[in-house]
Image (cartoon, rainbow, N blue to C red):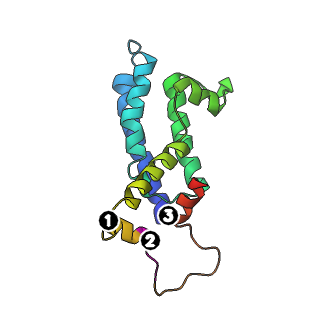
C-alpha cells in the first residue's frame, strides 16, 4: 500500500470513528429531525474526513473510496438500505448534499486562489510555481502533481 493510500485510509477511519460516536447519541435518536442530523453530519463528520483536502493530489480510486464512505454514511442517516435500489444522485438530493469530489474541487480552487494572491516570497507560492533543477523520474507514466489536478479542475 502506498503512503498516500494509508493516509487516506486513516482519514476515512477517523471520520468513521466520529460517525460511530454520533450514532450512539444523535443519529439514532428518533426525537431529532432529519435536517438536524444532516447538519451535524456536515459540520462534524465531513470536516474530519476532508481535513487538509486543499493540498491532496487524488486519483480516481481515492475519490471512489471517499465517495463510498460518504454515500454509506448518508444512506445510514437517511435510513436507506441497499436493497431499496436508490441511486446515489437521489440520495444526495434527498440529503441536500453534494458529492465529495465536488467539495474537494471547490476547496482546492479556493486554496489556489489564496496562494495566487500571496506575496512571492511566501513558501506556498514558491512551491506552487517552483520547478526542480535536478533529479530523474522513474520509467513509466509520471505521477500526478498538484498543479496537474488544479489545471484539470479549472478546465
Judging by the rendered image, the residue that carries numbered circle 1 is: 119
Could you say which disc has been placed on residue 146 in the image? 3
- Left/right placement of residue 140 relative to residue 148 reads right
Q: Is residue 38 magenta?
A: no
- Left/right placement of residue 148 relative to residue 114 reads right
- The kind of secondary structure element at disc 2 is helix
Q: Mark 2 or mark 1: which comes first in sequence?
A: 1
As drawn, the residue found furthest toward the right would be 85
What percent of the width, then of the height, locates residue 145? 52, 67
Which of the pair 15/150 is nearer the observer? 150
> Are the two marked residues, 1 and 3, in contact with CB atoms closer than 8 angstroms?
no
Q: Is residue 110 visible?
A: yes
Above-or-below relation of 93 to 65: above
Q: Mark 1 or mark 3: which comes first in sequence?
A: 1
Mark 2 Cα within 10 Å, few/some/many (few <14, many 20+)?
Answer: few
Q: Residue at x 40, y 37 (%)?
A: 45
What percent of the width, then of the height, locates residue 139? 63, 81
Of the 4 image quadrants, the one containing the C terminus is bottom right
Which of the pair 70/130 is nearer the observer? 130
Q: Residue at x 39, y 53 (%)?
A: 52
What percent of the width, then of the height, locates residue 31? 38, 12
As drawn, the residue found furthest toward the bottom would be 134
Q: Residue at x 36, y 65 (%)?
A: 124
Amino acid at each position: 500500500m502506498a503512503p498516500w493510500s494509508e493516509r487516506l485510509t486513516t482519514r476515512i477511519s477517523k471520520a468513521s470513528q466520529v460517525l460511530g460516536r454520533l450514532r450512539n447519541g444523535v443519529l439514532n435518536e428518533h426525537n431529532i429531525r432529519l435536517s438536524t442530523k444532516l447538519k451535524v453530519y456536515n459540520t462534524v463528520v465531513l470536516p474530519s474526513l476532508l481535513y487538509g483536502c486543499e493540498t491532496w493530489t487524488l486519483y480516481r480510486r481515492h475519490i471512489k473510496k471517499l465517495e463510498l464512505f460518504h454515500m454509506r454514511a448518508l444512506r445510514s442517516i437517511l435510513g436507506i438500505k441497499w436493497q431499496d435500489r436508490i441511486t446515489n444522485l437521489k440520495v444526495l438530493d434527498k440529503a441536500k448534499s453534494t458529492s465529495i469530489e465536488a467539495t474537494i474541487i471547490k476547496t482546492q480552487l479556493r486554496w489556489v486562489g489564496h496562494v495566487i494572491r500571496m506575496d512571492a516570497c511566501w513558501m506556498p507560492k514558491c512551491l506552487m510555481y517552483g520547478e526542480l533543477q535536478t533529479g530523474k523520474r522513474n520509467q513509466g507514466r509520471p505521477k500526478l502533481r498538484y498543479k496537474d489536478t488544479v489545471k484539470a479542475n479549472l478546465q
